[in-house]
């Protein structure tokens, strides 16, 4: 048995000072503070010990675009693992259905290989043209039973989230179909007002794709999708890089469940330059990614460790709430709360260690140190 000791252990109910976590292979067997059990002790030197991060919205990293090839998908996931993301929901941008079918096959293969990929997020093609952002408008379509069935079949049970503009013809019916299929319907890239968004949530949509971005704004007379989600108690994704959402606006989301995501593209970790997202040129300058053709934000160069640190230092969350937003709430949304997303006996030993400044120092996945 391995015992990780001398840590500030972040659990769903609070922080255990001088805490310890015992592991048997890939499984957490015990959590406590004070006197520790016998075993092979690894002293963490007072660092923060958190559950591994679960990113519900990411397109690539380390120079690898998930949609380029199966090998690029694997390499991009491996890059984010070094930054603390122990479970990845692969996000696929709007593309022709044939291309999405091929990409979903890669995702399904990766998920079935036990690589830490937990499935696919289809960020399109059922989005609003007026709010498509960096999505390619040429490939946006209305949902039809045949197109939806084909995409879900291609994912072999691994399509976990689909972003929907509910005002699109067939949009609310798509929410019904996804919910009936056990897939999370996420409202996003939408021009819907409060009432239409609320109708989607009442029909079972249970997430908001990158809140405030790619949707109608929250005006005091026309509240839009974000207030509808908060009224419905639906979790909102937040790209917490300080570019997509101001910290003051991010704090408005604390009224409801929060999910930290990266929306990272292949440029993440690579520096400034020109990249490609969904067949469109993206220029990264000062770490900020924008479409070359119109300057629209085009994903980010964020990693989950930075998102968590900024949640504490800039948005004002305590470490327990930040951990829940990066791990616990995403796990629950995916139905993985009994497998991962928290430090508790019986769950997988997916862990990250942060130093006093909340910088990442070590990463463990399935009981094995990956980083540090």
Image (cartoon, helix red, strand yellow):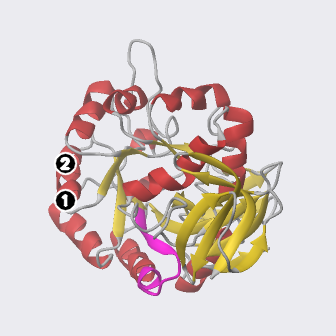
Does label 1 or label 2 sit earlier along the sequence?
1
Residue at 42% x, 38% y: name it: 130
Magenta run includes residue 111: yes
Residue 199 location, quadrant:
top left
Report x, y in % for residue 72. Answer: 60, 80
Task: Give the CA separation, mark 1 to mark 2.
Answer: 7 Å
Q: Are marks 1 and 2 in contact (CB under 8 Å)?
A: yes
Report x, y in % for residue 301. Answer: 70, 56
Using the image, determine if residue 311 lies above or below residue 74: above
Residue at 44% x, 13% y: name it: 220
Report x, y in % for residue 116. Answer: 52, 76
**Label 1, on which residue?**
144
- Crowd band around label 1 with a 10 angstrom C-alpha radius: few (<14), some (14–19), many (20+): some
**Left/right of residue 337 with respect to residue 304 in the rendered view:** left
**Label 2, on which residue?**
170
Residues in magenta, as a range: 109-121
Residue 58 location, quadrant:
bottom right
Residue at 46% x, 50% y: name it: 329
Report x, y in % for residue 228. Answer: 35, 28
In the image, 331 versus 349, the foreground residue is: 349
Residue 289 can be seen in this image:
no
């Amino acid at each position: 048995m391995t015992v990780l000791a001398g840590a500030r252990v972040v659990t769903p109910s609070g922080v255990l000072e001088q805490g310890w976590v015992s592991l048997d292979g890939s499984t957490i067997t015990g959590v406590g503070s004070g006197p520790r059990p016998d075993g092979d002790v690894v002293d963490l030197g007072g660092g923060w010990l958190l559950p591994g991060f679960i990113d519900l919205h990411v397109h690539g990293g380390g120079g690898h675009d998930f949609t380029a090839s199966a090998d690029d998908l694997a390499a991009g996931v491996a890059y984010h693992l070094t930054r603390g993301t122990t479970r990845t929901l692969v996000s696929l941008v709007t593309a022709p259905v044939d291309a999405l079918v091929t990409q979903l096959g890669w995702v399904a293969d990766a998920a079935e290989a036990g690589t830490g990929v937990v499935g696919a997020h289809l960020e399109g093609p059922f989005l609003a043209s007026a709010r498509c952002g960096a999505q390619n408008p040429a490939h946006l379509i209305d949902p039809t039973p045949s197109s939806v069935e084909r995409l879900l079949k291609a994912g072999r049970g691994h399509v976990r989230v689909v972003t929907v503009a509910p005002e699109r013809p067939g949009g609310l019916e798509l929410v019904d179909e996804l919910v009936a299929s056990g897939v999370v319907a996420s409202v996003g890239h939408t021009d819907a007002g409060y009432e239409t968004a609320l109708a989607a949530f009442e029909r079972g949509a249970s997430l908001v794709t990158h809140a405030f971005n790619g949707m109608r704004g929250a005006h005091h007379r026309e509240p839009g999708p974000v207030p509808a989600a908060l009224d419905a108690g639906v979790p909102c994704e937040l790209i917490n890089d300080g570019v997509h959402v101001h910290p003051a606006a991010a704090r408005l989301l604390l009224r409801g469940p929060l999910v930290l995501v990266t929306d990272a593209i292949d440029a993440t970790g690579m520096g400034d330059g020109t990249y490609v997202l969904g067949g469109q040129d993206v220029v990264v300058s000062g770490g900020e990614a924008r479409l070359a053709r119109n300057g629209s934000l085009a994903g980010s160069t964020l990693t989950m460790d930075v998102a968590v640190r900024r949640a504490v230092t800039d948005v004002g969350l305590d470490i327990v709430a930040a951990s829940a937003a990066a791990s616990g709430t995403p796990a629950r949304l995916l139905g993985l709360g009994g497998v991962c997303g928290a430090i508790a006996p019986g769950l997988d030993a997916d862990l990250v260690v942060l130093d006093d400044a909340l910088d990442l120092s070590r990463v463990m996945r399935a009981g094995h140190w990956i980083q540090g």
